Amino acid sequence: MSTAGRLCSDLTKFALKPHDAHEVSQLNELKIDMSGLNMIAGWVANGDVIMMEQMPIFGGYSGGKEETAICDVATMIASFVLFNCDIHLDGPIHIRWGTTTTRETLQIAAHACAALDKNTNLLLGNQYYTLAGPCTEMCLLETAAQSMTDTASGRELISGVASSKGVTQDRTTGMEARMMGEVAGATAGMDVAEVNEVLKKLVGLYERDFSHAPAGKRFQECYDVNTILPTDDYINIYSRAVRTMGRCGLDMNIY
Amino acid sequence: MAAKKYLDIYDSYDRFHNGKRVREDSWDYVIVPTNAMAMREKYDINFSDDIIPDDDDLCDRLFQAGVEMLCTTGFYNTDIGRALQVSEEEVYEGIRRSPKNIKLGSGKEEVSCIPRRGNSSTPPIIEGGPTGAPVSEDIFVPMMQSYAQEATVDVLVSGVLNTIKKHPSITNTPWEIRATLAEIGFVREAANMAGRPGLGI
């Protein structure tokens, strides 16, 4: 989006309020443009909450897992120190799959967050891009794995879910956010070693399907668009994913 | 040593303006990867098989590596073609001055975002929404309502309207402005329909 587009979001009575998150992006890696700087200047002057986003690419300019995590830490610090943001929104992404839910990108996000969590009070978020689409167990398990990772590594906010990599029209629904939230609630307070054991089983269940991930269904096929209720089909798939999570060692205890 | 001042956005612009001129391809293909590799070696950063680290010393070294990466590499402005530099004192001053509590939303839906510290028993704030994925105009409000009505959702994040009144919302045109304002209006409408008008966006 342009600077004008972002800054005008504070106009009219329906507009963003100072207590809404005003989102601006860095560029990969350790880069920004004038559009970003100008948006921030406007929002700082207006006293708005500023959320700065950047998704470091694993396998991109920075290189392997450890190098990407080092760049991720530097990037997150820069959001606060150079660009006056209030919360950083992360999202390490896999160059081959375009998702945040691979074993490597979960590891990068967890290490970078834990490093900052232990040494600072910075407010850190993470965003979700799954490979599989809505109304599939794989999409829900990918979401669950990242939610466990983010919660146990100390994130303050989690944002999603951009199912189907967030690039396909209408392939996102509230049910994925339900999974993200319920898993976070079930994970909070668990011993980290125990979370790692669950993740070992859980990630192993879906990562072998990356090359043939199911596209899932559009919102219109997942919900009754008049009552805004999920279909029986999606409820059944959700329940199946919850049972799978239980077998991996996470008791969601939701019903 | 303490820093003289906390850098603000205007200081950062001035530093870009007066920074060292660098070619963008050198930044991408030489400076960033070379420095990241050097920091990995200097601080001996190697991950085990665990997804979440349970090693305090590794976390400390990774933090130091990130701070030094920022201080030795700087930050690049693609429009100006220059990189700014920041000192370690300024980095720590900036970290100290950063907010430790922000409020999102209003009224009954107001939530406080505060540091959790490790795997606290307080879960993170749940921001539900398509996270920038494209959404058709005709289902934008119902889709956003599907998030707003979820009990675990604390704040909303919008999808993107590719069209407004069936017209493409082309960036940096009046149609983008119209689509942006319509998008926010639709998200508010969805929050209202879910009975949660104060939800933050």
Image (cartoon, helix red, strand yellow):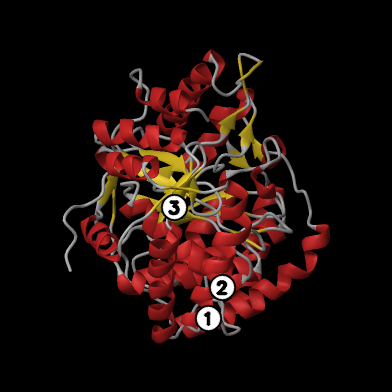
For marks 2 and 3, the one nearer the N-term is 2
Which disc, if any, is residue B37? 2
- Label 3 amino acid? Phe
Residue at numbered disc 1: B41
Q: What element carries label 1?
A: helix
Task: Give percent across and percent down for residue B54.
Answer: 45, 84
Q: Are marks 2 and 1 in contact (CB under 8 Å)?
A: yes
Q: Nearer the viewer, residue B96 or A114?
A: B96
Marked residue chain, label 3: B
For marks 3 and 1, the one nearer the N-term is 1
Q: Is B180 left, or right, of B192 in this rendering? A: right
- Classify mark 1: residues with Cα within 10 Å, few (<14), some (14-19) or many (20+): few
User: Can you see residue A134?
Assistant: no
Task: Give percent across and percent down for residue A118.
Answer: 34, 74
- Label 1 amino acid? Glu
Residue at numbered disc 3: B75
Q: Is mark 2 on a helix, strand or loop?
A: helix
Task: Give percent across and percent down for residue B40.
Answer: 52, 77
Q: How far apart are marks 2 and 1 (CA)?
A: 6 Å
- Classify mark 2: residues with Cα within 10 Å, few (<14), some (14-19) or many (20+): some
Marked residue chain, label 2: B
